[in-house]
Image (cartoon, helix red, strand yellow):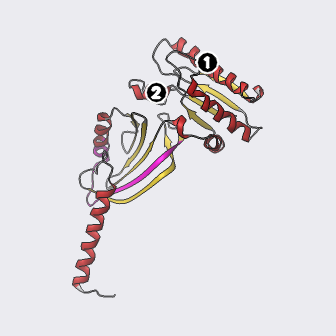
Amino acid sequence: MKKYPLIFLILFFAVSLLYSQEVELKSEHPIFKAYPGFTLYDYEKQDFGAYRFCDINGDNFIVEGQVTYYYYECDDTADPKNILTRFQEIGDSLDANMYGDGKNQLYMVVQSENRRMYVDLFAEDFYYTLNLVERGELKSEVSAEDLFNDLNEIGKAVLYFNFKRRDCELTSDCKDIIEMIAEALRKDPTMGISIDSYTDNIGPREENLQLSKNRAETIYNALVSEGIDKQRMVFNGYGESKPIADNSSVIGRAFNNRVEIVKK
């Protein structure tokens, strides 16, 4: 075994410690600081990437934006539930929509002005991973190519139309989304879709069901006007029956008022 001078070993560990501290100081998220006793060991940031996130029903969907991966370890052990509790407290302070298994996994969605943050935390007794995706509004960042890829790779795309409350009329800023869907469908003339509309739980259930059907039909008619064959599309309204977020918060209700374009 090769031996090194003591001074070399001291310098090596000193430089390693300084480097570790420098990485941690530069890389830690300003909101989600390390859990006490844990050290940041690995970090990666992508200015634009894609991440497979999980909704409240356990279904996966793709989120695109700035993706950051964190990996923390501790020298001893910690109760994963305590780690989750710490981050839940942070989520509460941000009025985040949170869900998970309550043992090792916590998902969090945070809305702030025009930004949205997706947080995926997984904790064990000696390590935890924290994956963050930060992005703007969905409709301003997804392209026809992105939508086309989502339909082919995961079978659906989740979109948010700026419908007025209790209304099914498309606003002027929804035209870009309609054109985007039409362009994606033109890429594959054989592809069929289902336009599935959902609402939050504010108001009578039957009214929400009818509202969602009317909104789906409005999008269907708009796509027909863009030259998409009627035979390639069906539309459905499901009202408040399939929430993907907690309706008790403003952010959760915003997520539930969605349209899913599903490949048939």
Q: What SS does tag 2 mark?
A: helix
Q: Is residue 65 left or right of residue 248?
A: right
| Image point (30%, 64%), residue name | 20
Residue type for callout 1: Lys
Q: Is residue 5 left or right of residue 100?
A: left
Q: Position of residue 234 (x, y in %)?
A: 70, 25
What is the distance, in whole Å, between disc 1 and disc 2 at their CAs? 18 Å
Answer with the quarter of the image where residue 15 lies. bottom left
User: Magenta stretch: residue 65 in it?
Assistant: yes
Q: Is residue 153 left or right of residue 6?
A: right
Quadrant in which the N terminus is drawn:
bottom left
60 and 215: which is toward the camera: 215
- Residue that label 1 marks: 213
Q: Which stretch appears magenta? A: 62-84
The answer to whether residue 196 is above or below residue 145 is above
Q: Position of residue 102 (x, y in %)?
A: 36, 39
| Image point (42%, 51%), residue name | 68
- Residue that label 2 marks: 254
Q: Earlier in the sequence, mark 1 or mark 2?
A: 1
Dot label at residue 249: none
Mark 2, residues whose alpha carbon is within 10 Å: few (<14), some, or many (≥20)?
some
Residue type for callout 2: Ala
Res 73 seen here: no
Q: Position of residue 96 (x, y in %)?
A: 36, 34
Q: What SS does tag 1 mark?
A: helix
| Image point (58%, 27%), residue name | 174
Q: Position of residue 225 (x, y in %)?
A: 72, 24
Mark 1, residues whose alpha carbon is within 10 Å: few (<14), some, or many (≥20)?
many
User: Magenta stretch: residue 47 in it?
Assistant: no
Res 257 seen here: yes
